Image (cartoon, rainbow, N blue to C red):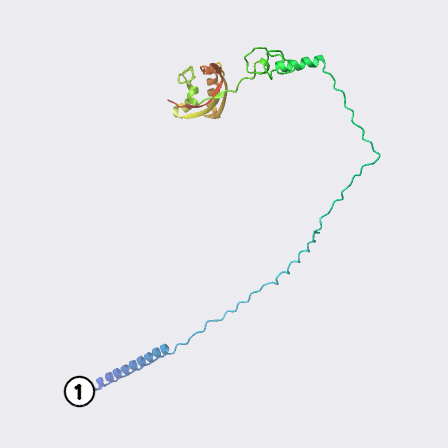
């Protein structure tokens, strides 16, 4: 038993030495690491920023412009125009101007003046209107000059509702209505056109102007239909029929 305890004691001694060695090594390294960290925080070296030198290269400035030329001094002295003095000649005799004798008017000129006073123009007749023309009829009630019939008065422009009231036909009837082509009617297309219609004093369509086209395939038939079939009652002003014009919006649809 003594020998076994001796062997067991020898085996325990190296383990204790190793533990002491490990502990001292760890403590020493920990102390060195702690000192190094404290020293690094205690002594901080400040780094100076790098200096950058910038050099601007520029060319020489342009030479200054030459001074403007000196303005000429205007002379302040006003220019005096020489005055011509006309002196009368002592021996010059002024002769009086001869006056031409007035010619007596001839009989033909007298008749023409009387005709102008009576009829309004040279060659007029008694009873004519002042400002008339030669050849007019005495006593005519025309609006022209010299008792004759003058140019016709321009057509009056009527509102659309007033002009439609002058229609003597029913524009919605089939014989007066423009129909759409079959392709447009099948597609149920709705179109409209703007027309300026002028009517004579007899009630017939004298002129049509297409202000807005409905479709090139319909415009010609539309103008021909209205010109050929539409009729109006004469529009009267002061009891007399006068021509008139108005703007019509014509709508076309498949209905």
Q: Residue furthest right?
A: 91
Q: x%, y% of residue 85?
A: 78, 41
Q: x%, y% of residue 59?
A: 60, 63
104 or 180, which is in the foreground?
Answer: 104
Q: Quadrant of the N terminus?
A: bottom left
Residue at x 48%, y 26% (from the top left corner):
211
On screen, residue 204 above or below 1: above
Residue at x 19%, y 85% (from the top left corner):
8
87 or 133, which is in the foreground?
Answer: 87
Q: x%, y% of residue 187?
A: 39, 26
| Mark 1 element type | helix
Residue 184 appearing in the image = yes
Residue 179 appearing in the image = no
On screen, residue 230 above or below 30: above
- Say which quarter of the image contains residue 186: top left
195 sits left or right of 80 in the view = left
Residue at x 25%, y 82% (from the top left corner):
19
Q: Residue furthest front?
A: 90
Q: Quadrant of the C terminus?
A: top left
Q: x%, y% of residue 124?
A: 63, 13
State the residue position of label 1: 5
Q: For the residue carrying disc 1, how many other residues have a C-alpha within 10 Å: few (<14), some (14-19), or many (20+)?
A: few
- Say which quarter of the image contains residue 191: top left
11 sits left or right of 231 in the view = left
């Amino acid at each position: 038993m003594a020998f076994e305890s001796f062997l067991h004691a020898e085996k325990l001694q190296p383990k204790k030495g190793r533990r002491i060695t490990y502990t001292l090594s760890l403590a020493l390294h920990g102390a060195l690491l702690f000192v190094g960290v404290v020293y690094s925080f205690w002594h901080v070296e400040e780094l100076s920023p790098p200096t950058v030198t910038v050099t601007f290269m520029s060319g020489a400035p342009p030479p200054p412009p030459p001074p403007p030329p000196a303005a000429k001094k205007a002379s302040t002295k006003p220019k005096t125009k020489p005055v011509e003095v006309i002196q009368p000649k002592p021996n010059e005799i002024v002769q009086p101007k001869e006056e031409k004798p007035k010619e007596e008017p001839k009989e033909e000129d007298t008749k023409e003046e009387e005709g102008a006073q009576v009829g309004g123009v040279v060659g007029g007749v008694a009873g004519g209107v002042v400002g008339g023309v030669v050849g007019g009829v005495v006593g005519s009630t025309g609006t022209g000059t010299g008792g004759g019939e003058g140019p016709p008065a321009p057509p009056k422009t009527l509102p659309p509702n007033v002009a439609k009231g002058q229609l003597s036909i029913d524009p919605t009837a089939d014989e007066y209505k423009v129909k759409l082509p079959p392709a447009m009617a099948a597609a149920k297309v709705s179109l409209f056109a703007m027309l300026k219609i002028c009517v004579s004093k007899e009630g017939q369509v004298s002129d049509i102007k297409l202000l807005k086209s409905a479709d090139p395939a319909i415009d010609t038939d539309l103008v021909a239909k209205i010109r050929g079939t539409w009729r109006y009652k004469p529009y009267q002003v002061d009891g007399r029929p006068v021509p008139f014009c108005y703007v019509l919006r014509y709508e076309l649809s498949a209905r």
